[in-house]
Image (cartoon, rainbow, N blue to C red):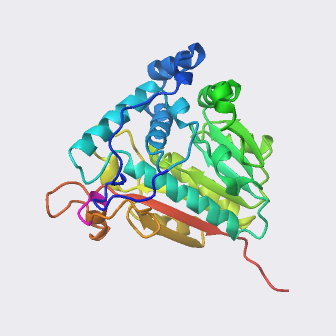
Protein backbone atom coordinates (compact mmCIF):
# COMPACT_ATOMS: atom_id res chain seq x y z
CA UNK A 1 0.00 0.00 0.00
CA UNK A 2 2.75 2.43 0.98
CA UNK A 3 6.01 2.21 -0.93
CA UNK A 4 8.22 5.14 0.14
CA UNK A 5 9.69 4.66 3.60
CA UNK A 6 10.56 7.57 5.89
CA UNK A 7 14.16 8.79 5.87
CA UNK A 8 13.88 9.09 9.64
CA UNK A 9 14.16 5.31 9.77
CA UNK A 10 11.13 4.63 11.95
CA UNK A 11 9.43 2.55 9.28
CA UNK A 12 6.47 4.83 8.63
CA UNK A 13 5.93 6.43 5.20
CA UNK A 14 6.57 10.16 4.94
CA UNK A 15 3.06 10.85 3.70
CA UNK A 16 1.26 8.81 6.36
CA UNK A 17 -0.69 10.92 8.83
CA UNK A 18 -1.38 8.86 11.93
CA UNK A 19 -4.83 7.35 11.67
CA UNK A 20 -7.30 6.25 14.29
CA UNK A 21 -7.79 2.54 14.77
CA UNK A 22 -10.56 1.05 12.65
CA UNK A 23 -11.73 -2.32 13.89
CA UNK A 24 -13.47 -4.75 11.51
CA UNK A 25 -17.14 -5.41 12.24
CA UNK A 26 -16.43 -9.13 12.48
CA UNK A 27 -14.66 -8.52 15.81
CA UNK A 28 -17.98 -7.51 17.35
CA UNK A 29 -19.97 -10.64 16.51
CA UNK A 30 -20.93 -12.81 19.47
CA UNK A 31 -18.78 -15.81 18.56
CA UNK A 32 -15.64 -13.74 18.01
CA UNK A 33 -16.21 -11.69 21.18
CA UNK A 34 -16.58 -14.87 23.26
CA UNK A 35 -13.41 -16.39 21.82
CA UNK A 36 -11.31 -13.32 22.55
CA UNK A 37 -12.82 -12.96 26.02
CA UNK A 38 -11.63 -16.50 26.74
CA UNK A 39 -8.18 -15.74 25.34
CA UNK A 40 -7.87 -12.59 27.46
CA UNK A 41 -8.92 -14.31 30.68
CA UNK A 42 -7.51 -17.84 30.39
CA UNK A 43 -4.41 -17.92 28.18
CA UNK A 44 -0.89 -17.59 29.59
CA UNK A 45 1.81 -15.30 28.18
CA UNK A 46 3.07 -17.92 25.72
CA UNK A 47 -0.35 -18.50 24.18
CA UNK A 48 -1.24 -14.78 24.23
CA UNK A 49 1.93 -13.97 22.30
CA UNK A 50 0.16 -15.42 19.24
CA UNK A 51 -2.43 -12.63 19.39
CA UNK A 52 0.21 -9.98 20.06
CA UNK A 53 2.08 -11.07 16.93
CA UNK A 54 -1.11 -10.96 14.87
CA UNK A 55 -1.84 -7.45 16.18
CA UNK A 56 1.60 -6.27 15.14
CA UNK A 57 1.11 -7.64 11.64
CA UNK A 58 -2.32 -6.04 11.41
CA UNK A 59 -1.01 -2.61 12.40
CA UNK A 60 1.93 -2.77 9.99
CA UNK A 61 -0.40 -3.56 7.10
CA UNK A 62 1.37 -1.00 4.88
CA UNK A 63 4.15 -3.62 4.68
CA UNK A 64 2.54 -6.94 5.59
CA UNK A 65 -0.50 -8.22 3.72
CA UNK A 66 -2.39 -10.32 6.25
CA UNK A 67 -6.18 -9.94 5.87
CA UNK A 68 -6.85 -12.23 8.85
CA UNK A 69 -4.53 -10.51 11.32
CA UNK A 70 -7.12 -8.12 12.83
CA UNK A 71 -9.57 -10.91 13.49
CA UNK A 72 -6.96 -13.23 15.02
CA UNK A 73 -5.43 -10.49 17.18
CA UNK A 74 -8.60 -9.28 18.85
CA UNK A 75 -9.59 -5.82 20.08
CA UNK A 76 -7.47 -5.85 23.27
CA UNK A 77 -4.14 -6.43 21.54
CA UNK A 78 -4.96 -4.18 18.58
CA UNK A 79 -5.74 -1.27 20.91
CA UNK A 80 -2.67 -1.87 23.10
CA UNK A 81 -0.19 -1.92 20.25
CA UNK A 82 -1.97 0.88 18.40
CA UNK A 83 -1.55 3.16 21.43
CA UNK A 84 2.16 2.34 21.62
CA UNK A 85 2.69 3.02 17.91
CA UNK A 86 0.72 6.28 18.12
CA UNK A 87 2.79 7.46 21.10
CA UNK A 88 6.06 6.60 19.34
CA UNK A 89 4.94 8.36 16.18
CA UNK A 90 3.90 11.54 18.02
CA UNK A 91 7.19 11.56 19.93
CA UNK A 92 9.16 11.07 16.69
CA UNK A 93 10.78 7.98 18.19
CA UNK A 94 13.71 6.42 16.37
CA UNK A 95 12.07 2.99 16.71
CA UNK A 96 8.33 2.61 16.30
CA UNK A 97 6.68 -0.16 18.32
CA UNK A 98 6.29 -3.29 16.24
CA UNK A 99 9.15 -2.59 13.83
CA UNK A 100 11.04 -5.68 15.06
CA UNK A 101 7.97 -7.81 14.44
CA UNK A 102 7.53 -6.29 10.97
CA UNK A 103 11.14 -6.95 10.00
CA UNK A 104 11.02 -10.45 11.49
CA UNK A 105 7.84 -11.30 9.57
CA UNK A 106 9.25 -10.03 6.28
CA UNK A 107 12.53 -11.86 6.86
CA UNK A 108 10.76 -15.17 7.50
CA UNK A 109 8.50 -14.62 4.46
CA UNK A 110 11.49 -14.02 2.19
CA UNK A 111 13.54 -16.87 3.66
CA UNK A 112 10.70 -19.38 3.31
CA UNK A 113 10.45 -18.49 -0.38
CA UNK A 114 14.23 -18.73 -0.82
CA UNK A 115 14.38 -22.08 1.00
CA UNK A 116 11.65 -23.58 -1.17
CA UNK A 117 13.52 -22.31 -4.22
CA UNK A 118 16.68 -24.10 -3.06
CA UNK A 119 15.01 -27.51 -3.25
CA UNK A 120 15.26 -29.50 -6.46
CA UNK A 121 11.58 -30.38 -5.98
CA UNK A 122 9.24 -27.51 -5.03
CA UNK A 123 6.75 -30.13 -3.77
CA UNK A 124 8.04 -29.71 -0.23
CA UNK A 125 6.78 -29.46 3.35
CA UNK A 126 6.77 -26.42 5.62
CA UNK A 127 6.38 -27.06 9.34
CA UNK A 128 5.48 -24.14 11.60
CA UNK A 129 6.30 -25.06 15.20
CA UNK A 130 4.40 -22.91 17.67
CA UNK A 131 2.38 -21.62 14.72
CA UNK A 132 0.03 -19.50 16.82
CA UNK A 133 -2.05 -17.17 14.65
CA UNK A 134 0.24 -17.52 11.62
CA UNK A 135 -1.63 -17.23 8.30
CA UNK A 136 1.11 -17.87 5.74
CA UNK A 137 -0.93 -20.74 4.29
CA UNK A 138 -3.44 -18.06 3.20
CA UNK A 139 -1.10 -15.26 2.11
CA UNK A 140 2.16 -16.60 0.59
CA UNK A 141 1.99 -17.54 -3.08
CA UNK A 142 5.30 -19.42 -2.84
CA UNK A 143 3.50 -22.16 -0.87
CA UNK A 144 1.30 -23.24 -3.77
CA UNK A 145 3.21 -26.52 -4.20
CA UNK A 146 3.90 -27.11 -0.50
CA UNK A 147 2.15 -29.02 2.26
CA UNK A 148 1.90 -26.88 5.39
CA UNK A 149 1.79 -28.23 8.94
CA UNK A 150 0.89 -25.94 11.84
CA UNK A 151 1.87 -27.33 15.25
CA UNK A 152 0.59 -25.73 18.45
CA UNK A 153 -1.45 -26.26 21.60
CA UNK A 154 -4.88 -27.76 20.88
CA UNK A 155 -6.75 -24.80 22.38
CA UNK A 156 -4.78 -22.33 20.23
CA UNK A 157 -5.51 -24.24 17.03
CA UNK A 158 -9.17 -24.69 17.98
CA UNK A 159 -9.67 -20.95 18.57
CA UNK A 160 -7.76 -20.09 15.40
CA UNK A 161 -9.77 -22.52 13.28
CA UNK A 162 -13.06 -21.13 14.62
CA UNK A 163 -12.01 -17.53 13.97
CA UNK A 164 -10.90 -18.29 10.41
CA UNK A 165 -14.15 -20.14 9.76
CA UNK A 166 -16.04 -17.04 10.95
CA UNK A 167 -14.11 -15.03 8.38
CA UNK A 168 -14.82 -17.61 5.67
CA UNK A 169 -18.54 -17.45 6.49
CA UNK A 170 -18.58 -13.64 6.40
CA UNK A 171 -19.69 -12.10 3.11
CA UNK A 172 -17.37 -9.15 3.71
CA UNK A 173 -14.30 -11.38 4.07
CA UNK A 174 -15.05 -14.20 1.62
CA UNK A 175 -13.66 -12.46 -1.44
CA UNK A 176 -10.29 -11.75 0.23
CA UNK A 177 -9.69 -15.20 1.68
CA UNK A 178 -8.39 -18.26 -0.06
CA UNK A 179 -5.76 -20.76 0.88
CA UNK A 180 -2.59 -20.29 -1.16
CA UNK A 181 -0.81 -23.42 0.12
CA UNK A 182 -1.23 -26.81 -1.56
CA UNK A 183 -2.56 -28.21 1.71
CA UNK A 184 -2.82 -27.21 5.37
CA UNK A 185 -2.82 -29.61 8.33
CA UNK A 186 -3.12 -28.44 11.92
CA UNK A 187 -1.42 -30.68 14.48
CA UNK A 188 -2.35 -30.34 18.14
CA UNK A 189 0.86 -30.94 20.06
CA UNK A 190 3.14 -29.37 22.67
CA UNK A 191 6.71 -29.17 21.37
CA UNK A 192 7.93 -29.29 24.97
CA UNK A 193 6.72 -32.90 25.14
CA UNK A 194 8.36 -35.97 23.61
CA UNK A 195 5.51 -36.97 21.30
CA UNK A 196 5.14 -33.97 18.99
CA UNK A 197 7.14 -35.49 16.13
CA UNK A 198 5.11 -38.70 16.34
CA UNK A 199 1.88 -36.69 16.21
CA UNK A 200 3.24 -34.76 13.24
CA UNK A 201 3.98 -37.98 11.36
CA UNK A 202 0.58 -39.46 12.18
CA UNK A 203 -0.91 -36.29 10.64
CA UNK A 204 0.84 -36.93 7.33
CA UNK A 205 4.32 -35.43 7.69
CA UNK A 206 6.88 -37.40 5.68
CA UNK A 207 10.43 -37.37 7.12
CA UNK A 208 11.90 -38.29 3.73
CA UNK A 209 10.47 -35.18 2.01
CA UNK A 210 12.33 -31.85 1.70
CA UNK A 211 11.21 -29.67 4.61
CA UNK A 212 11.46 -26.08 5.83
CA UNK A 213 11.14 -25.88 9.63
CA UNK A 214 9.96 -22.51 10.97
CA UNK A 215 10.53 -21.48 14.59
CA UNK A 216 9.36 -17.87 14.66
CA UNK A 217 9.02 -16.12 18.00
CA UNK A 218 8.88 -19.34 19.98
CA UNK A 219 12.19 -20.94 20.93
CA UNK A 220 13.12 -18.45 23.66
CA UNK A 221 9.93 -19.34 25.55
CA UNK A 222 11.28 -22.88 26.02
CA UNK A 223 13.64 -24.11 28.70
CA UNK A 224 17.19 -24.87 27.66
CA UNK A 225 16.56 -28.63 27.64
CA UNK A 226 13.33 -28.37 25.66
CA UNK A 227 14.80 -25.97 23.11
CA UNK A 228 17.88 -28.12 22.57
CA UNK A 229 15.71 -31.21 22.15
CA UNK A 230 13.63 -29.50 19.43
CA UNK A 231 16.73 -28.25 17.61
CA UNK A 232 18.37 -31.68 17.79
CA UNK A 233 15.29 -33.41 16.35
CA UNK A 234 15.31 -31.01 13.39
CA UNK A 235 19.09 -31.31 12.95
CA UNK A 236 18.79 -35.09 12.81
CA UNK A 237 16.54 -34.68 9.76
CA UNK A 238 19.60 -33.43 7.85
CA UNK A 239 20.83 -37.03 7.73
CA UNK A 240 17.63 -38.06 5.92
CA UNK A 241 16.72 -35.25 3.53
CA UNK A 242 17.48 -31.66 2.53
CA UNK A 243 16.41 -29.74 5.62
CA UNK A 244 16.19 -25.98 6.25
CA UNK A 245 15.66 -24.38 9.66
CA UNK A 246 14.52 -20.76 10.00
CA UNK A 247 14.54 -19.45 13.55
CA UNK A 248 15.06 -16.34 15.65
CA UNK A 249 17.24 -16.46 18.76
CA UNK A 250 17.67 -14.04 21.65
CA UNK A 251 21.00 -13.41 23.33
CA UNK A 252 21.49 -13.68 27.09
CA UNK A 253 20.79 -10.01 28.01
CA UNK A 254 17.40 -10.28 26.27
CA UNK A 255 16.27 -13.11 28.54
CA UNK A 256 17.62 -11.72 31.82
CA UNK A 257 15.67 -8.46 31.87
CA UNK A 258 13.35 -7.82 34.81
CA UNK A 259 10.01 -9.63 34.43
CA UNK A 260 11.24 -11.51 31.37
CA UNK A 261 9.15 -14.52 30.37
CA UNK A 262 11.95 -15.88 28.18
CA UNK A 263 14.27 -18.75 29.07
CA UNK A 264 16.37 -20.14 26.25
CA UNK A 265 19.08 -17.99 24.72
CA UNK A 266 22.10 -18.38 22.49
CA UNK A 267 24.75 -15.71 22.07
CA UNK A 268 26.27 -17.68 19.20
CA UNK A 269 23.58 -19.68 17.37
CA UNK A 270 25.87 -19.78 14.33
CA UNK A 271 28.24 -21.91 16.45
CA UNK A 272 25.53 -23.91 18.20
CA UNK A 273 23.69 -25.19 15.14
CA UNK A 274 26.73 -26.70 13.34
CA UNK A 275 27.51 -28.60 16.54
CA UNK A 276 24.08 -30.22 16.28
CA UNK A 277 24.48 -31.32 12.66
CA UNK A 278 23.66 -28.40 10.35
CA UNK A 279 26.29 -27.88 7.66
CA UNK A 280 25.44 -24.32 6.58
CA UNK A 281 24.41 -21.48 8.88
CA UNK A 282 23.79 -17.80 8.08
CA UNK A 283 23.09 -15.30 10.87
CA UNK A 284 21.61 -11.84 10.48
CA UNK A 285 20.69 -9.07 12.88
CA UNK A 286 17.86 -6.54 12.52
CA UNK A 287 19.22 -3.86 10.19
CA UNK A 288 21.53 -6.12 8.17
CA UNK A 289 21.06 -5.95 4.38
CA UNK A 290 18.73 -8.98 4.36
CA UNK A 291 16.89 -7.84 7.53
CA UNK A 292 16.27 -4.20 6.72
CA UNK A 293 13.30 -3.88 4.33
CA UNK A 294 13.65 -0.08 4.16
CA UNK A 295 12.92 0.36 7.85
CA UNK A 296 16.39 0.98 9.27
CA UNK A 297 17.68 4.19 7.68
CA UNK A 298 18.60 5.94 10.94
CA UNK A 299 22.16 4.97 11.97
CA UNK A 300 21.35 5.93 15.57
CA UNK A 301 18.36 3.68 16.04
CA UNK A 302 18.72 0.91 18.59
CA UNK A 303 19.38 -1.85 16.08
CA UNK A 304 22.06 -0.08 14.07
CA UNK A 305 23.83 0.99 17.27
CA UNK A 306 23.95 -2.64 18.38
CA UNK A 307 25.22 -3.85 15.01
CA UNK A 308 28.25 -1.57 15.35
CA UNK A 309 29.33 -3.36 18.55
CA UNK A 310 31.01 -6.78 18.83
CA UNK A 311 28.46 -9.48 19.65
CA UNK A 312 30.42 -10.35 22.80
CA UNK A 313 29.57 -6.95 24.36
CA UNK A 314 26.63 -7.34 26.77
CA UNK A 315 26.35 -3.73 28.02
CA UNK A 316 26.31 -0.71 25.74
CA UNK A 317 29.35 1.50 26.48
CA UNK A 318 27.43 4.73 25.76
CA UNK A 319 24.58 4.38 28.24
CA UNK A 320 25.09 1.15 30.20
CA UNK A 321 21.92 -0.48 28.85
CA UNK A 322 21.85 -4.23 28.10
CA UNK A 323 22.70 -5.14 24.50
CA UNK A 324 19.51 -7.06 23.73
CA UNK A 325 19.92 -8.73 20.34
CA UNK A 326 17.61 -10.75 18.13
CA UNK A 327 19.36 -13.07 15.70
CA UNK A 328 17.63 -14.26 12.53
CA UNK A 329 19.15 -17.57 11.52
CA UNK A 330 18.94 -19.78 8.46
CA UNK A 331 20.52 -23.23 8.80
CA UNK A 332 20.49 -26.16 6.45
CA UNK A 333 21.88 -29.62 5.89
CA UNK A 334 21.56 -32.62 3.59
CA UNK A 335 22.60 -36.27 3.64
CA UNK A 336 26.22 -36.73 2.67
CA UNK A 337 26.36 -37.91 -0.93
CA UNK A 338 28.97 -40.60 -1.60
CA UNK A 339 30.20 -41.51 -5.06
CA UNK A 340 30.34 -45.21 -5.95
Vertical order, 336 against 132 (above or below): below
Q: Is residue 2 left or right of residue 312?
A: right
Which residue: 44% across, 30% down?
Answer: 22
Indicate the quadrant where residue 338 lies: bottom right
Which residue: 47% across, 54% down?
Answer: 104
Residue 249: where, in percent of width, then height?
44, 55
Vertical order, 262 against 331 (above or below): above
Seen from the viewer's position, the closer of residues 154 and 225 is 154
Which residue: 61% across, 42% down?
Answer: 135
Seen from the viewer's position, the closer of residues 26 and 98 is 26
Residue lying furthest top in this view? 30
Seen from the viewer's position, the closer of residues 317 and 116 is 116
Which residue: 44% across, 51% down?
Answer: 102
Q: Is residue 273 left or right of residue 307?
A: right
Residue 200, visible in the rendered structure: yes
Residue lying furthest left in this view? 319
Residue 279: where, in percent of width, then height?
60, 73
**Residue 127 belongs to magenta span:** no
Q: State which region is magenta.
A: 299-303
Indicate the quadrant where residue 243 lies: bottom right
Residue 229: where, in percent of width, then height?
57, 51
- For the C terminus, which image quadrant? bottom right
Q: Is residue 203 left or right of residue 37?
A: right
User: Which secondary structure type mostly characterizes the magenta part of the structure?
Assistant: loop
Residue lying furthest right in this view? 340
Vertical order, 200 against 157 (above or below): below
Residue 111: where, in percent of width, then height?
58, 62
Amino acid sequence: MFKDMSEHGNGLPENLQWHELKLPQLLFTQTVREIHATIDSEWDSLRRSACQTAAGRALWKHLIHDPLADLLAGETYLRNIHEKIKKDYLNNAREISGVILAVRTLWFDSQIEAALGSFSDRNAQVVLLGAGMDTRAYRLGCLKESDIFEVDFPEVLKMKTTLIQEAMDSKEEQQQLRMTAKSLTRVAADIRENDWLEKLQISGFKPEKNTVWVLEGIIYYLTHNDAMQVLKIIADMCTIVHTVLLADFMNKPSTTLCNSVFHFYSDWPDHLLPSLGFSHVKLSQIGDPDAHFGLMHDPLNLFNRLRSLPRSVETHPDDGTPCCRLYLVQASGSPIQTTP
